[in-house]
Image (tube, rainbow, N blue to C red):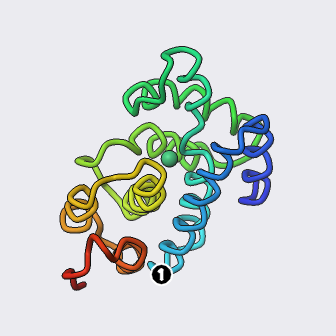
Amino acid sequence: MTVLETAKKMIDYSHGNLHDINHFMKVYAYAKMIADGEQLDPDTQKLVEMTALVHDIACPLCRVKYGNTNGKNQEKESAALIAEFFKDSNLPQDFTDRISFLVSHHHTLDQIDGIDYQIIIEADYLVNADESHFSGDNIKNMYDKIFRTETGKFLLRSMYQNCLENETL
Ligand SMILES: [Fe+2]
């Protein structure tokens, strides 16, 4: 299964919910940029891009089941949905296991254990800071405490310059 096939399948899976589609396509674009900047090996690059596309796979189910897309509920529901999504993908088991782990942890900031995880956190935050109107203090705190990659920090600084005007690399 390719990144293109994953994108097409995920868009189709979203049943015309343009809010969801626009969200994960933006996260995908930033994740790809950050991954390009980190010069990952081809497998990790593919894993990051695919994870960005499917990272919010549990949102539609959570809206129905819980009435919200609270991060903890998403983390609980994601694994089964990811397993089903990639069932016929011919991707190695350890590859889809890692996607499942990352999707299930993408709201957990204190367990970042690899560059793939780091990139998903940064890319999702870049989009959520806008979509969810995060405060300047929240953005500054994320910049100082969580963001690590050069490209991710560059993007956060450039996109939210009014909050980060005194920050340097
Ligand atoms: Fe997201």
* Secondary structure beneath label 1: helix
Name above or below for residue 20 compared with residue 151: above
Going 53% across and 78% down the picture, which residue do you hit? 36
Q: Quadrant of residue 10?
A: top right
Relative side of 111 to 40, left or right = left
Going 45% across and 46% down the picture, which residue do you hit? 102
Closest to the observer: 8 or 38? 8
Closest to the observer: 121 or 129? 129
Going 78% across and 34% down the picture, which residue do you hit? 15
Going 60% across and 51% down the picture, which residue do you hit? 24
Name above or below for residue 31 compared with residue 153: above
Name above or below for residue 69 compared with residue 20: above
Q: Quadrant of residue 119?
A: bottom left
- Residue 45, how many percent across, how many down? 56, 68
- Residue 20, how many percent across, how many down? 63, 43
Relative side of 119 to 137, left or right = right
Q: Residue furthest front?
A: 162
Task: Report which residue position mark 1 lands on.
Answer: 37
Relative side of 85 to 120, left or right = right
- Residue 98, how many percent across, how many down? 49, 47
Residue type, label 1: Gly
Q: Residue furthest top?
A: 65
| Quadrant of the snapshot with the C terminus | bottom left
Closest to the observer: 154 or 46? 154
Name above or below for residue 78 compared with residue 66: below
